[in-house]
Image: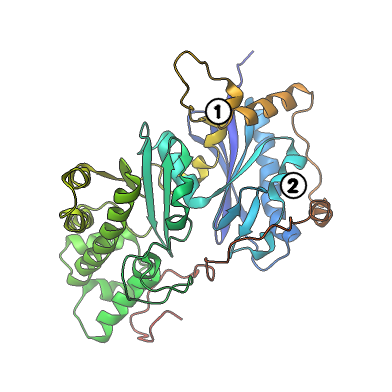
């Protein structure tokens, strides 16, 4: 008889598609399924492709002999962790306040956890990637927006919520474009896809000679690799973009280092990577902002480890199931043992084990289940929520248009 291996099902929802994967106990993606993201639909239609893919993943995992521990989801937006449901998902507004955990646990009889996508990516890097064995980790991603996550002892740091999240609203300048939060100088308005587009379009309007502009005019897609290639060749515009981005990221990291003392900074997968040219600008900016600080802080900045993400595009997918596969250990007084239920994933593990021992492992109801009835049975609590600070959904395009010269892409 083959011994069962622990595994979990991870779900990462993106703008055009969602990835559903079977992830083994060592953090490896064993099999993946893609499902379409249906935008502008009610909750029932939005969830249908995801549920079909989860059904298929569970069946394949059971057929392969995996002992499933739970289902983890990484979503692009803000979550209400008290009531375990999405709070603000600009990409899929029909899921706002929808009892998603209740639905999935009722449907599959497995424990479910929700994560903000950037938190999930940081958890994945801490458990299986670049920040393994580190107690305090800062993850920064630069895509359509800037995202940030701070992980302390295997858990997102609650005290950092004001300056982390899917959209990072950390102020790094006194002026700049107005952010969706109402302020100016947020890092997401200075280091993002739109911010880089503005730099390219401004250079095109000035008539600067740049092979980067030429390649984009020839309809090449803007990417981290394209930018790195042109910077390595000495293109002036690409080098100025690295200098601009390094400047603002250095200021941001100085803030996190001063207030939260991360041991390692992970640059997540996105528009930028840990290119040596970018890192040199980033470190120069970091040291210039902390050079006049106390010697201990300045030395901490000099010794700070800045590394690229190891898990690539799978970081959030893998991180969504970390609580089931790699629960963090809670510090205990000497001589006092720790029980499995007291680990962050212990209670969930016990729930999954009890449900498996009950006979049938999973239930596969038809996709035509009345999701609206489930939502009505679990109404939205009358607890006030903080104001919206996410703004509009991220733009779907990724190709700058230097020829248009109209301030932004069409």
Q: Is residue 300 visible?
A: yes
What number is the disc on residue 326?
Answer: none
Give the answer, above or below, for where 229 lies relative to 195: above
How far across and how far down the image is residue 211, in percent?
22, 72
Picture residue at 37% right of the left edge, 34% below the top: 132
From the viewer's perspective, tell me whether residue 259 is left or right of residue 246. right
In the image: residue 205, left or right of residue 161: left
Number of other residues with Cα within 10 Å of mark 1, as a class: few under 14, some 14 to 19, many 20 or more:
some
User: In the image, which disc is placed on residue 343?
Assistant: 1
Compared across the picture, whether 354 is left or right of 288 comes to right
Q: How is the image coloured?
A: rainbow
> Residue 249: image x %, image y %?
29, 59
Q: Quadrant of the N terminus?
A: top right
Q: Is residue 314 visible?
A: no
Quarter of the figure with residue 292: bottom left
For marks 2 and 1, give the one nearer the viewer: 1
Q: Nearer the viewer, residue 15 or 349?
A: 349
Q: Secondary structure at mark 2?
A: helix
Where's residue 228, x and y in %? 25, 59
Residue bearing the label numbered 2: 103
Q: Position of residue 25 (x, y in %)?
A: 52, 28
Q: Residue at x 37, y 39 (%)?
A: 136
Neighbours of disc 2 within 10 Å: few (<14), some (14-19), many (20+): some
Q: Is residue 152 above or below residue 377?
A: above
Mark 2 and mark 1 residues within 8 Å of each other at the beta carbon: no
Q: Quadrant of residue 195?
A: bottom left
Task: Give whichever of 181, 364 is nearer the camera.
Answer: 181
Q: Earlier in the sequence, mark 2 or mark 1?
A: 2
Residues 41 and 301: in front is: 301
Label 2 vs label 1: CA separation? Answer: 25 Å
């Amino acid at each position: 008889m083959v011994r069962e291996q622990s595994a979990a099902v991870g779900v990462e929802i993106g703008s055009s598609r969602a990835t559903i994967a079977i992830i083994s106990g060592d953090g490896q993606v064993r099999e993946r399924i893609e499902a379409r993201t249906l935008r502008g639909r009610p909750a029932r239609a939005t969830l249908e492709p995801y549920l079909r893919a989860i059904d298929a993943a569970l069946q394949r995992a059971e057929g392969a002999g995996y002992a499933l521990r739970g289902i983890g989801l990484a979503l692009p937006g803000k979550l209400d962790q008290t009531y375990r449901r999405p709070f603000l998902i600009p990409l899929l507004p029909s899921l706002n306040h929808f009892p998603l955990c209740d639905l999935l646990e009722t449907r599959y009889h497995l424990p479910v956890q929700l994560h903000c996508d950037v938190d999930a990516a940081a958890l994945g890097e801490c458990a299986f990637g670049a920040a393994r064995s580190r107690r305090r980790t800062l993850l920064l991603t630069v895509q359509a927006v800037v995202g940030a996550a701070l992980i302390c002892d295997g858990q997102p740091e609650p005290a950092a919520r004001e300056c982390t999240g899917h959209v990072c609203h950390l102020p790094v300048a006194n002026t700049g474009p107005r952010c969706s939060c109402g302020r100016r100088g947020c890092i997401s308005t200075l280091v993002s896809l739109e911010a880089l587009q503005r730099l390219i379009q401004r250079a095109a309007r000035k008539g600067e000679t740049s092979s980067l502009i030429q390649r984009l005019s020839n309809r090449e897609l803007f990417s981290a690799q394209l930018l790195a290639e042109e910077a390595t060749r000495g293109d002036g515009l690409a080098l100025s973009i690295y200098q601009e981005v390094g400047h603002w990221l250095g200021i941001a990291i100085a803030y996190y280092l001063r207030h939260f003392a991360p041991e390692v900074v992970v640059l997540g997968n996105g528009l930028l990577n840990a290119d040596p040219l970018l890192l040199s600008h980033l470190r120069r900016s970091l040291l210039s902002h902390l050079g006049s600080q106390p010697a201990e802080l300045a030395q901490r900045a000099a010794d700070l480890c800045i590394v690229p993400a190891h898990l690539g595009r799978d970081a959030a997918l893998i991180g969504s199931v970390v609580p089931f596969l790699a629960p963090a250990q809670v510090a205990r007084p000497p001589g006092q043992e720790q029980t499995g239920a007291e680990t962050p994933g212990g209670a969930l593990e016990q729930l999954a084990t009890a449900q498996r021992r009950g006979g049938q492992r999973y239930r596969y109801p038809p996709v035509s289940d009345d999701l609206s009835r489930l939502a009505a049975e679990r109404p939205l609590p009358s607890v006030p929520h903080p104001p919206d600070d996410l703004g509009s959904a991220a733009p779907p395009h990724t190709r700058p248009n230097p020829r248009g010269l109209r301030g932004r892409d069409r």
